[in-house]
Image (cartoon, rainbow, N blue to C red):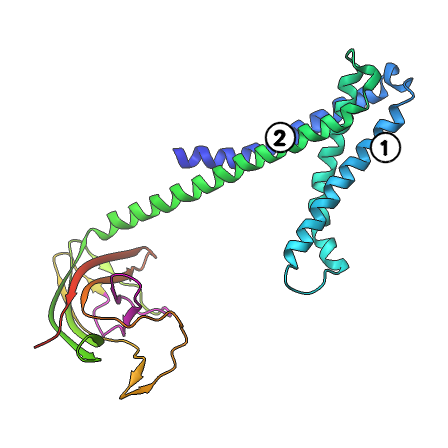
Amino acid sequence: MHAFLFRFLAAGLPIVGSIAVLAVAGWGLRELLAERVRERPDRPVAVVLAVVIGVTVGGTLVWLGVNVATFGGENPHLDRYLQFLPIGLMIAAPVAIASVAGYAILVRTRLARVALIGTALGAAAMIGIGVSGGSVVSYANAQSVEIAIDQDAADLAARSSVLTLSISDLHVATTGGGTVVSRIRMRVAVATSRDIRIAVGNKTAWPRFLVKQEGNHPMLDAPTPPGPAFLGAGSSTMYDLTFDAPQLSDGGKPRIILASTYVEPTLGSWVMRMQLEDEAGQTFEVTAPVVIAATP
């Protein structure tokens, strides 16, 4: 429900704002054509000021957008400005309309003698409303995305609760005096409490098994061993897995590993993760803790 409200707010507020701008534009045009305004000598000046203010604001945003897009790169060219021109026009038009409306409002008050100030006040009000509305829309979008992510995670956890992992026959090979893990071999039993038909024929072979040491360590991926495409309710399927960890050296000779932040895995607490996709495209993910210790 909350996700729907945030999505509705994110989508509805721009529409309401557009309708409001059109309404203000219609009212401002009617006021400019009214007899008491047509007779004012500052009317043409107000229109020119409104256009100048709108173009200035829109042009400034176009300039900023182009400079941000080309920051640290090539010099901005005409095509870059043309890319941002529609955005500038979308900003310039409401600001100019608000400027005219500000002038028309002051004409109807005791401040009619200084009604030209209304062009600046109207533009400032529109910019403030636009910034505030943009912040609200941005917040609503962020909240709806966060809620959707949380809901997806909850759905995945509920769907995956039918699977359990059991680890046995753990064998660990080490280097570096017995502290660095080079290879892990284990048997993993996958039990399920309901029928699951595994997706086949895709680029990814399912199930996929990964292990990772807790902390800033690499994720190790084992080749998917042969197995059934159907996991029946109450069954337990065994997989023999081998995980090889990249090594920074080989017999004292350094190896080149592209990731400069690579941290060699060591003995300690790890997490086993199995990922699975069924024929319907639904994903499953289940984890199990595992302690990697030196094999006697």
Assess whether residue 218 is covered by the magenta stretch: yes
Which amino acid type is shown beneath numbered disc 2?
Ile
The foreground one among 271 and 168 is: 271
At 28% from the left and 61% from the top, the residue drawn is: 215
The foreground one among 109 and 86 is: 109
- Residue 3 locus on image (x, y percent): 41, 37
Q: Secondary structure at mark 1?
A: helix
In the rendered structure, the answer to whether residue 144 lies left or right of residue 152 reads right
At 20% from the left and 51% from the top, the residue drawn is: 161
Nearest to N terminus: mark 2 or mark 1: 1
Image height of 294 relative to 46, above or below: below
What residue would you read off at disc 2? 129
Tally of numbered tags: 2
Q: Which residues are magenta?
A: 202-229
- Residue 282 locus on image (x, y percent): 32, 55
Q: Secondary structure at mark 2?
A: helix
Task: Decide: few, some or many residues near mark 2? Use Cα within 10 Å; few <14, some 14-19, many ≥20.
Answer: few
At 60% from the left and 33% from the top, the residue drawn is: 15
Query: What is the quadrant of the N terminus in the image?
Result: top left
